[in-house]
Amino acid sequence: MAPPSAIDIRGLTDTEALIYPNPLTVNEVTERRAKAGKLIAGVAAGTSSDLFKSKSNGKLAKRFDHLISEESKSRGTSSLKAAAKFLSTPGIISLGGGLPCSEYFPIQDLSMTVPVAPDFSEEGTRKSGVVVTTGKYDTTQGDGTYDLSICLNYGQGTGSAQLLRFVVEHTEMAHSPPYKDWQCALSVGSTMSLEQAYRIFTERGDYILSEEYTFASAVETALPLGCKFIGIKMDSEGLMPTDMDDILSNWDVKARGARKPHLLYTVPTGQNPSGATQSVERRKELYKVCQKHDVFIIEDEPYYFLQMQPYTGADAPPAAPPASNEEFLRLLVPSLLSLDTDGRVMRLDSFSKVIAPGTRTGWVTASAQIVERFIRHNESSAQNPSGLSAITLYKLLDETWGHDGYLQWLRHLRVEYTARRDALLLACEKFLPKDIITWTPPAAGMFLWLEVDLANHPHAATKSVLEIEDEMFLACVEKGVLLSKGSWFLGDKTKEPTQLFLRATFAAATAEKMEQAIERVGVAVRDAFGVKA
Amino acid sequence: MAPPSAIDIRGLTDTEALIYPNPLTVNEVTERRAKAGKLIAGVAAGTSSDLFKSKSNGKLAKRFDHLISEESKSRGTSSLKAAAKFLSTPGIISLGGGLPCSEYFPIQDLSMTVPVAPDFSEEGTRKSGVVVTTGKYDTTQGDGTYDLSICLNYGQGTGSAQLLRFVVEHTEMAHSPPYKDWQCALSVGSTMSLEQAYRIFTERGDYILSEEYTFASAVETALPLGCKFIGIKMDSEGLMPTDMDDILSNWDVKARGARKPHLLYTVPTGQNPSGATQSVERRKELYKVCQKHDVFIIEDEPYYFLQMQPYTGADAPPAAPPASNEEFLRLLVPSLLSLDTDGRVMRLDSFSKVIAPGTRTGWVTASAQIVERFIRHNESSAQNPSGLSAITLYKLLDETWGHDGYLQWLRHLRVEYTARRDALLLACEKFLPKDIITWTPPAAGMFLWLEVDLANHPHAATKSVLEIEDEMFLACVEKGVLLSKGSWFLGDKTKEPTQLFLRATFAAATAEKMEQAIERVGVAVRDAFGVKA
């Protein structure tokens, strides 16, 4: 057996490394593109991830027909879209589709100033930023790959070929899905992707598995579809596969009034609200339980690239950030997608946390079967991301930064978020009563999860957790700090919480403001518990 | 009684004019804005149409609780969003919401070149277009109303306050809804709005009423939701209210296996595929039938502002286009929304046909009750249009053109589409056999609906309409023209068509290409019927 590979980004054993394909490198993408020649994709051009992927000899994903909803199954292809095949007939004049003529799009060109490596700061952009311009007819009157006449017209349910190419390559570089027929499709953000995922995999009355405390919108999106959440116990590494196995092994259809759950919603990295990140061992264990019970996984990963440097504490020097893009990728915890030999993961990615939420653009990755269901739904709902978002992202990520520059940008965010998190943690260490409030330094994401020990609370015996939580929340507001209540994130709304949590974000306020805020929280908590500083 | 008013844009009788409010004028909007002062709406600011409307003393819309689906009814407000009210506490520091910090949005500024009146052509834009620039902090570091730091962050389910203000004012100017509590909300395009409307108003198993031939996507979107379409007979003015009344009056729940329909999907202006436009009399008659049977109306109006000049024929001079914005508005057929005294219309507007489809931006207008259901759905799906689309539209429509300039742009489109339609009609008159193919010159939209009389077709007795349609479609492709088959647009897929239609668009090809295409169609049709030119 070969010696342990030092460059395996996925923390895999040698045996496992034989199962999972090697990730693609930036250089290989460059070579592949050179070989493929210029990307030609005009107005409403059909496209597919398969055009942009490595040719893999791996096995195909399993089929999941038995888990797909009646609604999703009945989505057919559009007869009008099917007619598009005749458009390639030489010399044909189309009076078919109702695509408006680009001469009526009242934008002639679009320019933006963007940062470039190595100084990605706003100050640096003012000094050394570059101006990127897009014309209306860059592809037909110049040698451009994408232009306003294309992005401002209708598109396909996959989203623009130009941006799709970038995310497919990026996905292969970061996750290298270990089966043959994985694909991506652009989305209008993960909130929408998640609703679509529910509609693909659930019927009214179903239970969805998730972390005990979970993204409130994920629950609020599922409830109108007639689905309930069942929470899995968590520790500092997020959901506990043993508890999930217990729940599924002992599922009582009659008592629950619902079939055994077959869908897991999880945020494995920098989970919202707990900040927990599943280790690679935890992920493998989780995946095995999903295989055992035939559970399909929705891996929602907005914070995947907000993995931070290890926290070294108040008195130790900070850890040196990754010195190269390769090292940066190597330090990332492997995604569930990268471990998904069956094709039972639908991964949701988003540009919201790494570029800007207002782009309303993200993408999904899953087996061809699932992505095709997703695309069919796009066609009769949001269709595809705004063309203005698509071309802005394409121009920035692909033409200006390239994969190399984008990874450098992500490293910039890593350093920035590490500093923000550290500032919040230092404030907590300084101002919070540690016998009452405890926390685990988050390794990823935007959130710190504060557990309040109620043992010595003066009303612990007479008031419910929810009552005390509300008092503490309002006491913090009174002192001038807005936190989030832990109970807002309970997936199972029928259960009374037995623990009290408060969520604080380090994404938004400055270090100075965070210190000020946490000092106030310290006062509010001590007041509530009747203790002195 | 006052003498008939010459400036009533809605073709109303004097008695009716007393019922329906007078439309708002551009000058009144200017005055209102001056009175309201600068619009302050920062990151994820809450907003409401009520801020931007005339104070009306009219009556409130009827409630439609009995028509709202279980799914839609169960959409609650988000607990996290509810906490936003504490953000207005003076001095508060928020560690609550997970909004990323704008310093990590890698776009420093955005510029675009756009046309201005009077020359909106591409040539004119190159000569006299203006450059419009948006900075990242125009609202906080300048006197701007909207900037990149706002549009690139998360927003609300209503969409951006800045763009919402424009569409609310525009809606009031064009439609002046005759009840008090109408509202608008931005959408990611009418395809998505329509899916949301179905989800608000239907349960699985329901029938939806619509024109016999209708927008294929409207049907394809409804089918996976378990809904079927029931077609209403049409004439040259679109759907026939008498037929709709018949269908509803004689509805047999048992025979149909479904409750009596309560939802109408209609495209009143420039209907797709028929090109038909309902006259104001037809609209009033339709509205009465909807009141009689308590039917809620989805008014899908992408082509409303593609109403054209009257067709004067090959030998007459073209009609002079409207000389002013006021005359332009006066010439528009009144919308169903403008006649909607009950609040039983949900109108879908879109920028796709009047600015560009790639903006993926539109809006809905309905009573507060319905718009609130729509916003709740936005919050757990697409959220709101891309911030890049919103700010581009805002900068163009509001800051550069203003309402006056936008109406001039719409007049420009009117003239352009009139010329395109006329070119296609002239080609048809020149090249098509009028004893076989007939058509009504469309008054709006993008489509010409060609009816093929099969009486003298050599296989009329032995082949089905669908077979002959397929042969003719392929014969046209063979000759080098792509048309759309009429049968693609049949709402009721269970019925065999008895008439043969082909749809041609005049939106896409040049006049020269259209002439060439129709000449080829003429040859294909004569070949199929075995007749000579």
Image (cartoon, coloured by chain):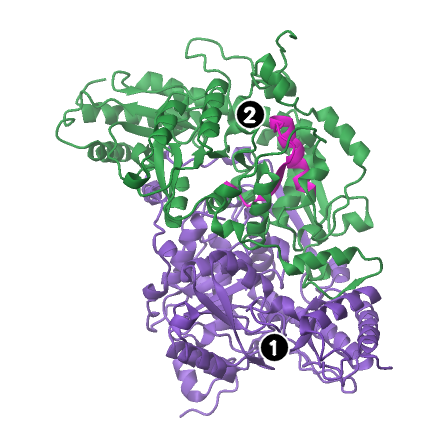
Chain colours: A green, B purple
Residue B212 vs B400, above or below: the answer is below
The span picked out in magenta is A162-190
Please indicate whether residue B129 sits to the left or right of residue B156 in the image: right
Q: What element carries label 2?
A: helix
Q: Mark 1 points at which residue?
A: B276
Amino acid type for the residue under numbered disc 2: Leu
Question: In the image, what residue occupies the spot 37% across and 20% down?
Answer: A427
Chain name for mark 2: A
Question: In the image, what residue occupies the spot 40% across and 33% down?
Answer: A210
Question: In the image, what residue occupies the spot 76% across and 51% down?
Answer: A137
Chain name for mark 1: B
Q: Quadrant of the C terminus of chain A?
A: top left
Residue A281 vs A177, above or below: the answer is above
Residue A502 visible in the picture: yes
Amino acid type for the residue under numbered disc 1: Ala
Disc number lying in front (1 or 2): 2
Q: In which quarter of the image is residue A267?
A: top left
- Residues under numbered marks 1 and 2 in contact, where contact means CB atoms less than 8 Å apart: no
Viewer-proximal residue among B378 and A282: A282
Q: Quadrant of residue A270?
A: top left
